[in-house]
Image (spheres, rainbow, N blue to C red):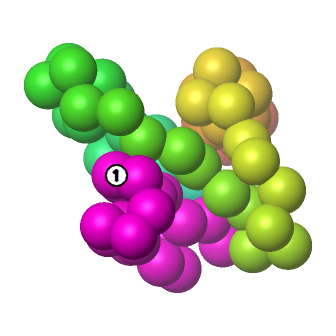
């Protein structure tokens, strides 16, 4: 599944599309550290929480070792 990050509010929105879960977690952590507000959406349009993606990425890494 791919993800998008949306920054800003309508009508001034910047969208970063087609990110993997690892990429979106990395980008979102940087945005959060910079105190920038953002939303994460799955490719099906579902709003997704950063915490859930972080857990999925951590579980994926743990299963690879």
Name the image quarter holding the C terminus. Answer: top right
Q: Quadrant of the N terminus?
A: bottom right
Residue 27 vertical placement versus 53 (above, below): below
Given residues 56 and 29, the one toward you in this image is: 29
Based on the displayed image, in which of its 4 quarters is residue 29 positioned?
A: top left
Identity of the residue furthest to the bottom in this view? 18
Residue located at (68% from left, 31% from top) = 49
Q: Main secondary structure of the magenta part?
A: strand
Indicate yes or no whether the magenta region holds residue 4.
yes
Q: Secondary structure under badge 1?
A: strand
Q: Which residues are magenta?
A: 1-20
Q: Is 42 placed above or below 16 here?
A: above
- Is residue 48 visible in the rendered image? The answer is yes
Asked whether 12 falls inside the magenta stretch, the response is yes
Residue position for label 1: 8
Compared across the picture, whether 23 is left or right of 20 comes to left
Q: Position of residue 41 (x, y in %)?
A: 67, 57
Residue at the spot 74% in from the left edge and 62% down from the top edge:
42
Which residue lies at the image location 41% right of the left edge and 53% below the top edge?
Answer: 9
Total numbered circles: 1
> For the residue carrying disc 1, how many other residues have a C-alpha within 10 Å: few (<14), some (14-19), or many (20+)?
few
Q: Is residue 18 above or below residue 52?
A: below
Q: Residue 56 lies in what quarter of the image?
A: top right
The residue positioned 58% from the left and 49% from the top of the image is 40
């Amino acid at each position: 599944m791919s993800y998008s990050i949306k920054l800003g509010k309508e009508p001034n929105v910047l969208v970063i599309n087609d990110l993997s879960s690892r990429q979106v977690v990395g980008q979102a952590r940087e945005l959060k550290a910079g105190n920038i507000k953002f939303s994460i959406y799955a490719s099906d349009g579902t709003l997704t929480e950063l915490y859930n993606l972080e857990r999925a990425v951590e579980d994926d890494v743990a299963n690879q070792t």
